[in-house]
Image (tube, rainbow, N blue to C red):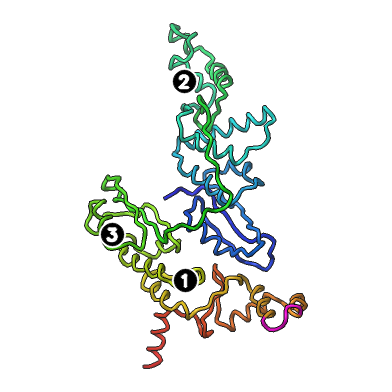
Amino acid sequence: MAKKVFAVYLAKEGNPNSDAYAKLDLPASPWVLWDALDKVRLQTDDILYMEIEDYYAFAYLAPHLDGLEISLNELNDLAALLSALDEIQKVAFDGFLRMEVQHKVDTNGGVITLQDLRDLAVSAKTDCYHVVEAADDAQLGRFYAENDFVPELDGISDGVFEMLDFAGIGRMMRCSQNGVFVNSLYVLRDGELTTAPPCAKDLPEKPGYLFRLTLGLHPDIGDDRTVTLILPAAEAELLGAQAQLGTEGWEGVAVIDYDGIIPYAAEFTDLPMELDEFNVLAAAVRDMPSPEKQLPKLKALLKQFEVQDIATVMGLTEHLDDYVLTPEISSPQETAIDQLHFMTDDHSAELLISHVNLYAYGCDIIREDNASLTPYGLLHRADYQPMLTPIQQSQEMEMKMK
């Protein structure tokens, strides 16, 4: 799984009545990004507001990213590049950034750009640098002297060696090399930076798959074989995946990566042990009529009922018509405004809005309709009865019949 780099908050810009928002960690998989936009529910002419709430291990990037015009896709791309760095490469990236900042200052070259950051992240994956264990000039000078990097010191005695000004040697080498200290390490660049390929501002099209699962053997087994499944899959494909991993069944198999049109489905499924059942769910999602409308409704129901098992999910997929989702409504205020427009003409509704306690009125309507505000919109039963899962409804009916 990718390491967290940024935590972001997304919402509609300039809409005081909207409570639609999404929070997610970057880098995020394609379907997670599209799910976030389902939660924000941008309409025509709406502008996406994005704020970085946490930088995790990259807090030093805040001054460079704050105020920078950057899209969600571009930020996710940068997060993916940074997430791929190991610990030494992170140090190199930090060092490269410090060098670049100083270069901009020295040459009046302006601010650090997104492309600069992407170039530095890509370059940290190459061999254009050296990292030395040295926290200051004195340690750096001793390192260079002890490892014969200063020809002038050849042949001196141990006694004279210990009398050397190591701090002065280190400072001289650092200044001539334009190196920098990062925590207790010294970073020296000795090659050209790599230019990162361009990144589009807009999100790419929605993935062509519904669910994608990458499986591998448990780390304790010590085998790095992996296999990627696109679900729903035929029985032969599932058996073929087991053959590639050298297993019978899914014992000893671990999930390495998951992406799906229902992003959190992996949280309530014991994968890969319940992979056969999950494959049935994937087929039900594939065969769902009007998926553009039904999928947000299914996701809203899963959140509403805090579903923790596949059986309940399957029951919901079979009873989606029992529920109504209104994605345009995200708050009590919007609920009230929608009701006013339903009750009277648009002009009269607009006149009334400033004289009505929209929040209180909206809360009353939601309570009266047995409805609920979900991350995907206002949800209620088609018959306005209390919201229950199909299983709960069956249990309630059985109790009434006794």
Magenta span main SS? helix
Q: In the image, which residues are magenta?
A: 342-347
Image coords of residue 146 (percent x, y):
44, 16
- In 3D space, how far apart are the residues under numbered discs 2 and 1 (Cα atoms)? 62 Å
Residue matched to label 3: 238
Q: Which residue is mark 2?
A: 143
Position of the C terminus by quadrant: bottom left
Residue at horizontal 67%, vertical 79%?
A: 361
**Quadrant in which residue 285 is drawn:** bottom left
- Which residue occupies the foreground of this view, 273 or 183? 273
Q: Residue at x 46, y 35 (%)?
A: 125
**Mark 1 residue crowding within 10 angstroms, few (<14) / some (14–19) / many (20+):** many
Q: Reading the chain from its start, which is encountered first: label 3 or label 1?
A: 3
User: How far apart, in angstroms, are the residues tagged by discs 3 and 2?
Assistant: 56 Å
Q: Earlier in the sequence, mark 3 or mark 2?
A: 2
Q: Residues within 10 Å of mark 2 (few under 14, many from 20)?
A: some
Cα distance between the residues tagged 3 and 1: 26 Å
Crowd band around label 3 with a 10 angstrom C-alpha radius: few (<14), some (14–19), many (20+): some
The location of residue 108, given as percent across then percent down, is 70, 30
